[in-house]
Image: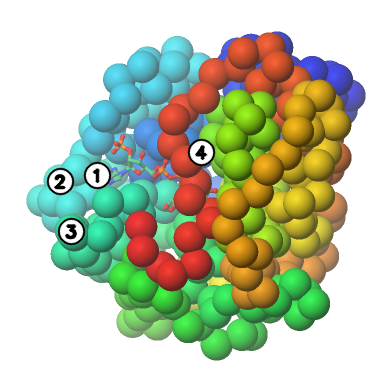
Amino acid sequence: MEYPTEIKDEAQLEDLLSVPNADLIALMKRLAGDIMILGIGGKMGITLGRQALNAISAAGVDKKVIGVSRFSDAAGRKRLEAWGVETIACDLLDSNEIAKLPHVKNIIYMAGRKFGTNGTEELTWAMNALVPGYVGTHFKNSNIVVFSTGCVYPLVNAQSGGCTEDAAPAPIGEYAQSCLGRERIFSYCSKQFGTEILLFRLNYAIDLRYGVLHDIGQQVFQGKPVNNTVGHFNILWQGDANSQALRCLEYCTSPAASLNITGPEIVRVEYIAEKFAELMGKKIRYTGESADKCYLNDSSKATELFGKPRVSVEQMIKWQAAWFMRGGASLGKPTHFEVNDGKY
Ligand SMILES: NC(=O)c1ccc[n+]([C@@H]2O[C@H](COP(=O)([O-])OP(=O)(O)OC[C@H]3O[C@@H](n4cnc5c(N)ncnc54)[C@H](OP(=O)(O)O)[C@@H]3O)[C@@H](O)[C@H]2O)c1
């Protein structure tokens, strides 16, 4: 598809994040059963649900998309319903509420807790490691794509090319440890019940209202020092991440397998900051010593399965710079990608 040179507002941004590609449309023609998205109410779920609906409609098949969340953001629920996603309000921490959810063949599991972990570690563990036990048991006859994170890996330097799926996990801090807990509990359910599961180890989705490019771009735009503590990272356009998550429904296995999901490039903070400064006509200052070790994933396997992402890093930088210069919206949710001591 032809992408615009600039994205003018949130409506156009959400449209672009929800465009399915031909492979996803083809998948909808052969995928049996409906799709349920658990934790749909967050930053990614809303456009993931809509992309699934758009693919179903383009495929001309009859399939429901059901979104489950507490819906802390009522406006998100309204938008989903207006597009045709059925919604069910549910607190996944309550196993009695999970027991009432309809059994659906295809599950995308996106619920989780990260920020605020420091001081309320028990809630993060309950959300990231106890809820997976409830979900893995209730949906034992489904295929489940489980959103996980690259933070389950050790920190590595850029020359390494990033961790492959074979790297041994070495999570730093309780948030990352609880994410490994989530993976381990789902893997247990997969072995115990034969449930087909894929662990979707994602590194940094990009939506212009939040994300690593948003955070660096905002620092440059506002003349604030750019945090260079973690010097390198990986990113992926959220529309591509959403599409790959849905396509992973076909790659769930028992025992569960993991898949790294991010862009093919290792990106340098200083490169991005310089590009933003050039596009926005700003000067850059840095803060933080650039550490040698960062969270970096090698996504070669995903590229083999899904091809190169549709949106390049250069395109994302241009869109993000123009977004700030037009006064585009921000969710006010920093990624804290500069954290490398595991404390969130
Ligand atoms: N975005 C990224 O770049 C990125 C990178 C790596 C990993 N991930 C992981 O991928 C997943 C999706 O990402 P995201 O950015 O969309 O996360 P998010 O914004 O945190 O969304 C997750 C949503 O899950 C719902 N949820 C949380 N607790 C719940 C509960 N007790 N019952 C029901 N729903 C609950 C929340 O919506 P309600 O308030 O409506 O319940 C929340 O907004 C997350 O697990 C995240 O950690 C994301």
Q: Is residue 183 left or right of residue 261?
A: left
Labels 4, 2: front one:
4
Labels 2, 1: front one:
2
Distance Cα–Cα, label 3 vs label 1 = 28 Å
Q: Position of residue 194 (x, y in %)?
A: 41, 77
Crowd tier of the residue under label 1, counting other residues whose Cα lies within 10 Å: few below 14, some 14–19, many 20 or above: some
Say what amino acid the circle numbered 3 marks.
Thr
Labels 3, 1: front one:
3
The tag on residue 44 is 4
Marks 2,1: beta carbons within 8 A: yes
Q: Nearer the viewer, residue 248 or 290?
A: 290
Question: Relative to 35, is 297 above or below?
Answer: below
The tag on residue 120 is 3
The tag on residue 101 is 1
Distance Cα–Cα, label 2 vs label 1 = 7 Å
Q: Is residue 46 left or right of residue 73?
A: right
Sequence-earlier tag: 3 or 4: 4
> At 76% from the left edge and 80% from the top edge, which residue is drawn?
160
Q: Say which quarter of the image contains residue 22.
A: top right
User: Which quarter of the rendered picture does the C terminus lie within?
Assistant: bottom left
Crowd tier of the residue under label 3, counting other residues whose Cα lies within 10 Å: few below 14, some 14–19, many 20 or above: few
Say what amino acid the circle numbered 2 marks.
Glu
Say what amino acid the circle numbered 1 marks.
Leu
Q: Position of residue 29 (x, y in %)?
A: 68, 41
User: Which quarter of the rendered picture does the N terminus lie within?
Assistant: top right
Secondary structure of residue under mark 2 = helix
The residue that mark 2 highlights is 97
Determine if residue 227 is in view: yes
Distance Cα–Cα, label 4 vs label 1 = 22 Å
